[in-house]
Image (cartoon, helix red, strand yellow):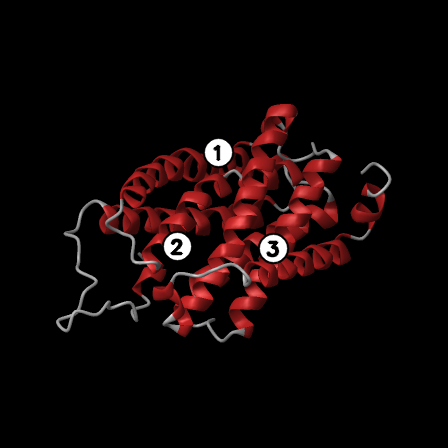
Amino acid sequence: MEALFPVIRGHPIPSVLVCALLFRVVDQLLQRLPVPKLVRQDEFHAWRWRNLSVSMVHSLLTGTWAVTCAVVWPEILQDLYLFYTPLSYLLVCVSTGYFVQDACDIIYTGHARGSWEFLLHHALVLSCFLYALCTQVYVAGAVVALFVEVNSVTLHLRLLLKLAGAQSTLLYNINKVANIITYVVFRLFTQFYLTWYILHNYTKLDSAGFFLFCMMIMNIMISIYLYRLLRSDFFTRRKSNITQNGTHNNNTRKFLSD
């Protein structure tokens, strides 16, 4: 790692593209795994299942990696601007590669219109992460931002269970509670801490206005998503997935917002 790090740091864009290709390989490998029959019956749901599966791999990897970095190097939480280690830099590089791959997948498969919120999120993240990689500042901030991937694990599991028609299972009910808890702890608190740090150190930070703008947009987005989650999982009557003729009504794409 010590020998490889100068190459990665000296060539951040090619390194990100290599990571994007690796996630593409992960995508191809995951396609060999069995898929629920209900998902296979709909082309869009089949794509979404594959896309979410790759996202789940990214979340499990980077969420664990980010928290581990903060535990091993507590300085990451204190100096979001200048502090970083080779492993934390590599983490941001790997995650940036995923977002490049995912954005390309959404656009290439023709789902950009229905997934515009994801593309907006990816554009904001990519602009911040690429800035951090190229300038070698805000790397620790990017690592802290990846705490949200802990919540993304339960968020992706929720959507996968919905695709499989498993909303009435015990696993879904347990996960929806865990999802709200991790949403508050790892997503809301993380975003608000990042926002507070930028505001508190605004005059000392380069491009603080740009990062604050990105944070405010994402703060609005995650607040809306939290409202949707609460409305969908806790404050509405369960809607039947069975049509009048007894078949599953899974052709809807409403799960993208719910």
- Residue under label 3, please give it: 98
Q: Nearer the viewer, residue 164 or 117?
A: 164
Coordinates of residue 52 in the picture (x, y in percent): 47, 57
Position of 182 with respect to 8 (left or right) is left
Label drawn at residue 160: 2
> Which sits earlier in the primary sequence, circle 3 or circle 2?
3
Front tag of 3 and 1: 3
Dots 3 and 1: beta carbons under 8 Å? no
Dots 3 and 2: beta carbons under 8 Å? no
Front tag of 3 and 2: 2
The residue type indicated by label 3 comes to Tyr
Position of 41 with respect to 52 (left or right) is left
- Residue under label 1, please give it: 193
Q: Helix, strand or loop at disc 2?
A: helix
Residue at x 15%, y 73% (from the top left corner): 245
Coordinates of residue 38 in the picture (x, y in percent): 34, 65
Dots 1 and 2: beta carbons under 8 Å? no
The residue type indicated by label 2 comes to Leu
> Which sits earlier in the primary sequence, circle 3 or circle 1?
3
Position of 145 with respect to 114 (left or right) is right
Coordinates of residue 121 in the picture (x, y in percent): 49, 56
Residue at x 58%, y 42% (from the top left corner): 62
**Residue 202: which quarter of the image?**
top right
Residue at x 63%, y 47% (from the top left corner): 207
The residue type indicated by label 1 comes to Tyr
Q: CA distance from mark 3 to mark 2?
A: 19 Å
> Which sits earlier in the primary sequence, circle 1 or circle 2?
2
**Residue 20: which quarter of the image?**
bottom right
Q: Nearer the viewer, residue 125 or 91?
A: 91
Q: CA distance from mark 1 to mark 2?
A: 30 Å
How many labels, in total? Answer: 3
On the rendered image, what quadrant is the N terminus found in?
Answer: top right
